[in-house]
Image (cartoon, rainbow, N blue to C red):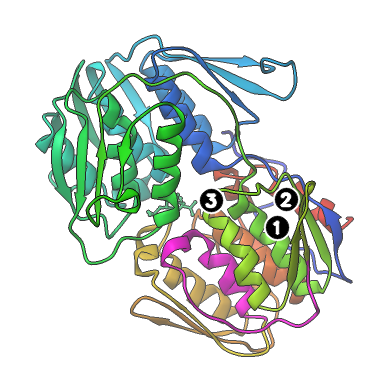
Amino acid sequence: MAPNTALPALWPAPHASGAVDATVHVPGSKSVTNRALVLAALASEPGWLRRPLRSRDTLLMAGALRAMGIEIEEGVGPEGTGEAWRVLPTGLRGPATVDVGNAGTVMRFLPPVAALADGPIRFDGDPRSYERPLNGVIDALRVLGARIDDDGRGALPLTVHGSGALDGGPVSIDASSSSQFVSALLLSGPRFNQGVEVRHTGATLPSMPHIRMTVDMLRAVGAQVDTPESGGEPNVWRVTPGALLGRDLTIEPDLSNAQPFLAAALVTGGKVVIPDWPERTTQPGDRLREIFTEMGGSCELTDYGLVFTGSGVIHGIDVDLGDVGELTPGIAAVAALADSPSTLRGVAHLRLHETDRLAALTKEINELGGDVTETADGLHIRPRPLHGGTFHTYEDHRMATAGAILGLAAEGVLIENVATTAKTLPDFPELWTGMLGQ
Ligand SMILES: O=C(O)C1=C[C@@H](OP(=O)(O)O)[C@@H](O)[C@H](O)C1
Ligand SMILES: C=C(OP(=O)(O)O)C(=O)O
């Protein structure tokens, strides 16, 4: 996605002059869109994605699949409503080059797909993508029969020499650095000759809701998946080989991207409505209903969506965010404005996200006058009055939205490179000023 040149290099984060009262239509989920694209590309018949997220990460996924021979057409959806993508799984082939940007979903979900292509697929990406762990996927694919050229660091860049099929079978991995290793192997598993049995051997496993999302979406396209929760062994997932159905799927709003808007209600003692909040979902952002309620808000889930109201008071929180790590930057920002200290635990793996999020949050909140310390697996946050200043974002969309939350309360916060929100939410600056009635 081209950078939005209309945005200044230092974006003045709007200061809230009163309680917000707004309805915010949040675009589709990154995690659901990118899984849906992969599953549609692996299916044996065409499928539809309605209201897909169009952001840097999802356009990179669509571009990569197109480069491998999949047709993705623009459409208006079977009933003529809503923008849609029609995916025609016309065969996977190389040679091709895939740009993963800094999208964890693209760099981890696609090498197994590439192993099924006919021909070599080269993967490259942003400088940060070279530092993000990929060893779980590379090592597992080799065990399952793939030929991969890399530089031995267990990271990008690499080339998968697809031969049109993969044996598959049992494999053990340590997914403690990213749940996406497990999701990646499961998503392509139905197309491996023997399916796949993934055994996680590490001490911890982050982001379980994202693994449940993978399993649910696989089952929805006809795959048979056995999981620890369905009576299987702990830490073992089994996918049976078989054809996948083409589906007509409407993508849910991205609940993790709803976070800054809900935070605005909390910080200003206002009200924010998020239409189409799903009644049931595997998205980790659904945990915000509980977390932001404990921090002082209240919410009601109606047929229309989620109505979230702040009380004007923000409480600190002691919480394990291991399941919902991507919510950490936004929770840290709210915690820095609370009436008591917070401890955020279980998120050591955030040091390997878009940036080292624990270091970045500590440095940037402290430079606005805050008092944050890093712990072995998270952050300890003692609220203090904040002042203005430059908030650096390290090409991390969630750092930018965290800075915007702080800017509601502290006058004069300048967000460096707010355009980085295009990774998952290109409309963020407009949605934010719209919410504030500016
Ligand atoms: O599978 C997914 O869609 C995701 C899984 C999580 O990754 P990690 O388990 O690497 O944290 C999450 O943080 C990321 O934003 C999206
Ligand atoms: C960790 C994140 O992204 P990625 O999919 O690149 O891992 C995130 O969006 O917070």
Report the residue marked by disc 1: 11
Question: Is 211 placed above or below 400 here?
Answer: above
Q: Nearer the viewer, mark 3 or mark 2?
A: 3
Q: Which residue is more in the foreground, 124 or 146?
A: 146
Circle 1 sits in a helix, a strand or a loop, which is it? strand
Q: Position of residue 180 (x, y in %)?
A: 35, 47
Badge 1: few (under 14), some or many (20 or more) residues near its Cα, within 10 Å?
Answer: some
Q: Is residue 292 left or right of residue 298?
A: left
Q: Which residues are magenta?
A: 309-337
Q: Amino acid at mark 3?
A: Gln
Question: Is 378 placed above or below 405 here?
Answer: below
| Res 238 quadrant in image | top left
Q: Position of residue 229 (x, y in %)?
A: 35, 53
Q: Is residue 333 left or right of residue 70?
A: right
Q: Which mark is residue 429?
A: 2
Question: Which residue lies at the image location 72% right of the left edge and 44% below the top edge?
Answer: 276
Q: Report whether the residue tagged 1 is closer than 8 Å to ligand 2.
A: no
Q: Which mark is residue 283?
A: 3
Circle 3 sits in a helix, a strand or a loop, which is it? loop
Q: Which residue is more in the foreground, 62 or 201?
A: 201
Question: Which residue lies at the image location 55% right of the left edge and 61% below the top edge?
Answer: 399
